[in-house]
């Protein structure tokens, strides 16, 4: 994984899966049942280490991603965050500049100590050949939850805030940038070897808005992390960025880019000439398995294995994925005769 | 509008808005109240003509789009379709090849007679300078509703059907292609001068799946319509196609392409060298109005007014849009000093 992110072409390519620690695994569900709430699971180092290690033990992935959630940052800023089973996250929404007074950046690192403890233990317990990935949400996506108060569908409240009061919304984004830089730097100190920035809702913006709320804050984070944690690779994932992927890579300075399922292979190949790429199997092909899984995975491998490439999904693994399909996928990716 | 679609650069550019007849207009809500169900409104020529004409009277748009819904095709094929207020459409889902026996292509044209009557009346009642647009959903998007039984979010059932049984799913797509060709040809006979094909959910597929379920069926429709209705322009709208827009235009043979809000201006300009383009203002900028509306609209105008271009939104207008913002937008677009 680290060689790939340094620009080397490695064969077979490293593989890990977004949300590889998760509900599709029976051992995850058993551990999850020991925590009262989802945030309790994220903030209990014993349980968080256990669920992070489960997919490594079962499959021997090349990288292990910290088990946590992008909403721990709003939580650490003092916003109320809770998870409703079957409905996803809920937050007391921040919908105008005046609400920013409720947030307090000075408490971020103290609130997130359990996450750093989880990383320190993982660093000790993981096999040495397994790369440890830390992560955070990108500011636009984190702000989407902070403003919508839930998973958005049309992002009406969020976009209206950004269009109506770009300075006030910019102050929220700046606050999330600052908190995210502190959070990710501390993750590196605690043992993270690679960072990933998830911008799950990057794909809903016009070009001017994308430049302002996706590219500019991401570049600010990348610039500051290069100062504070030189040499630590950062993977950007602007999901759904479509035709803006190339500008995102060029202008943010990310080390590598994670591609969503819709990115075609010709353009993934063009991006790969600029930086290592990661992706982008459709999680539904992994659910279905069999011929669909083989064909979709092999098309990606054939197109991208000639350059620096990390095999992954184009989006998180879904709970109904049969665990044996993951084993089958690893076999496909590691088969040198493929 | 017709000169633009023939490839001419027209100044100021023609303008119409997707869902311009709709809930944001008080006169629409008054007419809607006269029909028991949403499908009754679509199938009542008196009411459908009235709501189609309302935005033309109020704003003088350059084009008028038939008031109807893409789900009249599944309905005409014999699938049960109903609309739940506040929840959107519901259908008895078709989830496997064996369910296709419930559908009957031979009843399509007979079932859709009221739509053709609406078009004939519109052709008589519209000002001669107003272009009449007919439309249908593209097969992938129509199939998404037929298989999911509702507006999808992750399209799990739909994608699983397509991955698990591509031949069976292909039979469903072929049936929708055939019904759509008949439906659109009859719309042209009844007076439609331009056709638009809405592929609202084109943006969720991997490249191989996009080629198979978006490009190939669209090309089949375009080829057959070129035979049956030579010279009638067809606008394709593969919403969210991202990096696949260029291949879509090149390989389907559509006359013009409608761009969603995320398409950046540099790439819109590149597409415009190949065919007329339409789009792509963020509907939320129209809700907010003021400076955000002016800046977003003017960025689009500046980038695209030098070639064949139809001003439109990047997605349908939303119910909470203040009607006076639409008047303001038309002023911006038609201001020759802009």
Image (spheres, coloured by chain):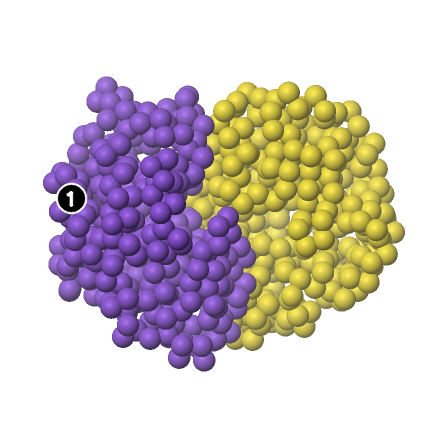
Chain colours: A purple, B yellow
Locate the N terminus of chain A by quadrant.
top left
Vertical placement of residue B12 versus A68, above or below: below
Locate the C terminus of chain A by quadrant.
top left
What residue do we see at 84% from left, 41% from top?
A: B114
What residue do we see at 55% from left, 20% from top?
A: B167
Mark 1 neighbour class, 10 Å CA radius: few under 14, some 14 to 19, many 20 or more: few
What residue do we see at 79% from left, 32% from top?
A: B109
Coordinates of residue B86 in the picture (x, y in percent): 68, 54
Direction from residue B19 to residue A266 in the image, left or right? left
Figure quadrant of residue B102: top right
Direction from residue B200 to residue A66 in the image, left or right? left
Q: Judging from the image, what secondary structure is the residue with disc 1 in?
A: helix
Chain for numbered disc 1: A
State the residue in front, A261 or B118: A261
State the residue in front, A168 or A149: A149
Q: Which residue is mark 1?
A: A125
Vertical placement of residue B51 versus B75, above or below: below
Vertical placement of residue B95 versus A97, above or below: above
């Amino acid at each position: 994984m680290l060689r790939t992110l340094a620009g080397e072409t490695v064969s077979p390519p490293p593989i890990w899966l977004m949300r590889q620690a998760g509900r599709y695994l029976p051992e995850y569900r058993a551990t999850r049942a020991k925590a009262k709430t989802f945030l309790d699971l994220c903030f209990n180092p014993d349980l968080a280490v256990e669920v992070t290690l489960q997919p490594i033990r079962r499959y021997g992935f090349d990288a292990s991603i910290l088990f946590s959630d992008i909403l721990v940052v709003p939580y650490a800023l003092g916003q109320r965050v809770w998870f409703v089973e079957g409905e996803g996250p809920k937050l007391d929404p921040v919908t105008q500049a005046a609400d920013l007074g409720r947030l307090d950046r000075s408490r971020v690192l103290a609130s997130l100590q359990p996450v750093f403890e989880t990383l320190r233990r993982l660093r000790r317990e993981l096999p040495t050949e397994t790369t440890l990935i830390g992560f955070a949400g990108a500011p636009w996506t984190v702000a989407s939850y902070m403003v919508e108060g839930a998973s958005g569908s049309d992002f009406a409240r969020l976009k209206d805030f950004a269009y109506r009061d770009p300075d006030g919304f910019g102050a929220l984004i700046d606050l999330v940038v600052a908190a995210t830089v502190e959070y990710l730097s501390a993750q590196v100190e605690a043992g993270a070897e690679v960072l990933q920035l998830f911008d799950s809702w990057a794909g809903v913006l016009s070009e001017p808005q994308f430049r302002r709320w996706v590219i500019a804050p991401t570049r600010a984070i990348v610039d500051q992390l290069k100062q504070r944690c030189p040499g630590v690779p950062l993977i950007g994932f602007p999901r759904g960025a479509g035709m803006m992927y190339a500008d995102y890579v060029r202008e943010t300075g990310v080390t590598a880019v994670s591609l969503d399922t819709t990115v075609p292979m010709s353009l993934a190949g063009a991006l790969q000439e600029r930086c290592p790429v990661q992706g982008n199997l459709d999680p539904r092909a992994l659910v279905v398995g069999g011929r669909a899984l083989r064909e979709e995975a092999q098309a990606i491998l054939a197109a991208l294995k000639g350059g620096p490439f990390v095999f992954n999904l184009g989006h998180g693994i879904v709970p109904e994925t049969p665990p044996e399909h993951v084993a089958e996928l690893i076999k496909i990716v590691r088969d040198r005769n493929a």
